[in-house]
Image: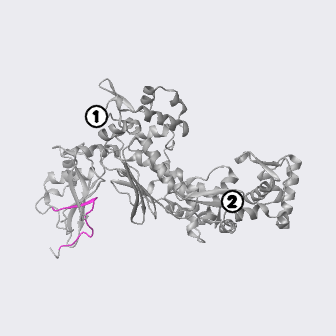
Amino acid sequence: MGDTPGIGFQESLTIEFKSDRSRLSDNDLVDAVVAFANTDGGIIYVGVEDDGAVTGLHPEHRDMTRLSAMIANKTVPPLPIKAELLWHGQPPAAIAAIHVSKSRTIAATSSGKLLRRRLKMDGTPENVPLYPFEITTRLSGLGLLDFSAQPVPDASYSDLDPVERARLRGVIQNQNGESALLELGDEELDQALQFATRHEGVPTPTLTGMLMIGRPSRLRALTPTAETAIQIMRGTEVKFNETLTLPLLAAYERIIAHVKAWNQETELTDGLYRISVPDFDQRALREAIVNAFCHRDYSILGRVRIQIGDEGLTISNPGGFVEGVSIGNLLAAEPHGRNPALANALKRIGLAERTGRGVDRIFEGSLRYGKPMPDYSASSNVLVSVFFPRSQPDRAFTRMVADEQARTGQPLSIVSLLILNFLKGCGRRSETAHTISKGVNVSAAIISSTLEPLTQSGLIEVSGSDRNRAYSLNLPRYREFAATGAEVGTHRRKKTERPESAVPPKEQNHEDMVLRLAKKQGYVTRADAASLLRLSPPQAFRILRRLALKGSLALSGKGRYARYVPAAAPPRHK
């Protein structure tokens, strides 16, 4: 076999070799096709040994049309594979490449065998039975079954806890959920949120109902997969470790209380404003925790785990990404979940992002402070894990973003923040829209439409023209915010106590002109100031804000309706 040519690559989860020297049986080939269809699809090479040596096809398997028809006839539903005849080596030997697509349902052989692919401990693949309990996971991952809407066996309506229902009503009120829900009676509320369904004419709790407001004792007995673990580490020492089997709202409150105790904040100043930057953004953590509850696979054993350590915070849940979602397209994939009934209930009560774009909040919580992005690289086909690195905020970047949001009266979009963070990492190097698109995993069309307003605002600079346009962070503006980044307190005193005589004469003249215009017409806008002084809108905004900080002008309105009016009384100086 040493002189036999090799195919040049190895078997994997999506590649398998089948020897055909003794004529591979049709049933063995069909088994392999079904296993691929029930996993991630792939290619089966017939006529290749396990070690990659090419030994060729049996003569009876050289008709690709006949081979495809045989596979379709022996699979349920009939699997439409693509078979092609290839030639390899010198002298050339024939092999068949059978391309199998991932099935959108459960596939079986005509004899009733259900199989799937998996990797063994040594990293080599194998085909194994697809057991009945795994079918639920498969169907829910494909979006064909809402496991959270199913009635819970052996559960009764009395297993729903009035105390937890009262907690639920409090969450609706405090989190600005749908106010109409508060007007419903208990049974109507349970029906509206799919907490119960009629099973054989009797109201029975669904999995969503038990998870949200089930009695803790019955939750442990009926839904043993509803576990949450909280771990706090300092080095290798475990400071705190608790496993909870509680309804989701109670578990969520317990988790948030522990995280807050270990979530330190850094205070930055921006003029008279203070910006508190936590190690882990509260809104991002809320969405990540809710996502873990929403998207975990409740048909398999495991637990949602929150671990806080010196390096950062990790949130993980059993069950891989659902069909159509991967690490590479998290911010672009159409929002859909494994447990629609549960996700819908959490949205309606105000705990989850109502647009379904909670992942945007997760990334925004790091991006707006110039911190490293959340890391999903530890996720697998059976686990989703997100890691929030513990790091100091980029003070200049945070101030620059806050300044722009104050100027426009609205937050920067997630795509804008992705672009700014990407260009910040590029330093002086300019990048095209195409390279930015690849760097942030967002389509080129969306990137191009976002670059224009960022350029107009002065946050980024553009060079070249037409197809050669390249973009970079506005480093002078970035450094301007870095230069004003003194420590909390010190910077504030210098800003507010500086005598007007310290203002450069040119800037003082600009301020006097703006004040005269404001008194003449009763107000002044950013556009008025920019036109009067022949400055860019961002430069005009900084002058208006400086006058507001001094007390000479007062801001009225927000966004495009913002205007500055003369203050009621002259500012007082110490």
Q: Quadrant of the rendered structure where residue 78 is?
A: top left
In the rendered image, which residue does mark 2 sit on? 270
From the image, which quarter does the N terminus lie in? bottom left
The amino acid marked with disc number 2 is Asp
Work out whether residue 572 or residue 10 is closer to the camera in this orientation and state it. 572
Q: Residue at x 84, y 63 (%)?
A: 500
Q: Are marks 1 and 2 in contact (CB under 8 Å)?
A: no
Main SS category, magenta section = loop
The label on residue 153 is: 1
Question: Outermost residue, top direction?
Answer: 201
Q: Indicate the secondary structure of the residue bearing disc 2.
A: strand
Q: Answer whether residue 306 is visible to the viewer in this image.
A: yes
From the image, which quarter does the C terminus lie in? bottom right
Q: Residue 355, position in %: x, y?
A: 51, 43
Q: Left of 121 or right of it: where is 364? A: right
Q: Left of 533 or right of it: where is 403? A: left
Q: Left of 560 or right of it: where is 133? A: left
Marks 1 and 2, the one that precedes in the sequence: 1
Does the segment drawn in magenta span residue 11?
yes
489 up-or-down from 570: above or below = below
216 up-or-down from 276: above or below = above
| Real-space CA distance between mark 1 and mark 2, rounded to the nearest whole angstrom | 57 Å
The boundaries of the magenta stretch are: 4-19
Question: Outermost residue, bottom direction?
Answer: 3
Q: Left of 21 or right of it: where is 278? A: right
